[in-house]
Image: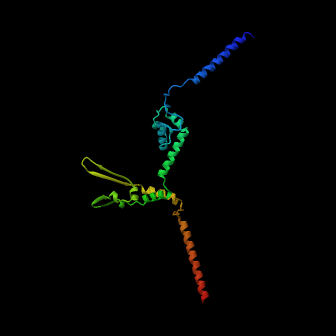
Amino acid sequence: MTDLVPGCRLEAMARRKKRACKTKAAMRPRGPVTSEMEGETEDEELNERALRFCDAYVIDPNATKAAKVAGFSAKTAAQQGCRLLKKVQVQDRIRRLIRERRERTKMEGDEVLLGVANIARADILNYMTFGPGGLVLRQSSELTEMQARCIREVTETCDTAGNRKLGFKLHDSLKAYDMLMKHHKLYDEPQVNVNISWADIMSGAKDVEAHAASEADDEQEDGDGGE
């Protein structure tokens, strides 16, 4: 038994020394942060990179891309983006930015349908005149607001000889009609069957003849009764 005592004492001393080292390490003041975490705190206020991350994430909800836009390196962007999304302050700001954008761009259903219908009804003659004398565009100041919204593109190019070339496009009216058809479920309307066989035609003709003969018999009976 006496041989085991010194060993037990040495083991106990080693455990106490190990605990003391851990305590000193925990109490030792930390040095300055030098990694990409620098400036990132859990305080209520978000720093500049976190704010840029929120703005970028609202535009494109991809954490890695938003982290790159915010200034993090490509090597750590995925990790930093995931970390930022876990912060309550970041989540709250992203929700607020999305809510504010919805308020700015809010559009009622009637307004949407009116705009699409306006594109579908757009008439090229409201924007230009053409004939033997050439093509002349109307002044933009003469267009109504709804007419201007139907314009997709207006271009003007000039070659080396000084010749001007104008380009003018309206939004696709057929696509607008397609959207309206789908909205009003006009594609679901029952279609008339035009694939009629010769047997169907003959059967229909017989039905017409039988009906006409029946009406003729009724008229004759009425005439006999009147006499």
Q: Position of residue 138 (x, y in %)?
A: 32, 59
Task: Point out residue 176 in the picture as x, y percentages from the top left corner.
Answer: 45, 56
Q: Say if 140 sits above or below 8 in the image.
A: below
**x 31%, y 51%: residue:** 156
| Up/down of 119 relative to 75, above or below | below
The image quadrant of residue 116 is bottom left
Task: State the residue in front, 165 or 80.
Answer: 80
Q: Is residue 209 left or right of residue 52?
A: right
Looking at the rendered image, the quarter that the C terminus falls into is bottom right
**Direction right: furthest residue:** 1
Which residue of the protein is positioned furthest toward the top in this rendering? 3
| Outermost residue to the left | 161
Q: Position of residue 66 (x, y in %)?
A: 48, 39
> In the figure, 206 relative to 172: above or below?
below
Give the image quarter of residue 91: top right
> Which residue is pictured at 53% across the width and 68% down the height?
201
Q: Nearer the viewer, residue 80 or 158?
A: 80
Q: Residue at x 56, y 75 (%)?
A: 209
The N terminus - image quarter:
top right
**Colour scheme shown:** rainbow
x, y percentage for residue 23?
61, 22
Tell how many labels.
0
Direction bottom: furthest residue: 227
Which residue is at the front of the view, 64 or 44? Answer: 44
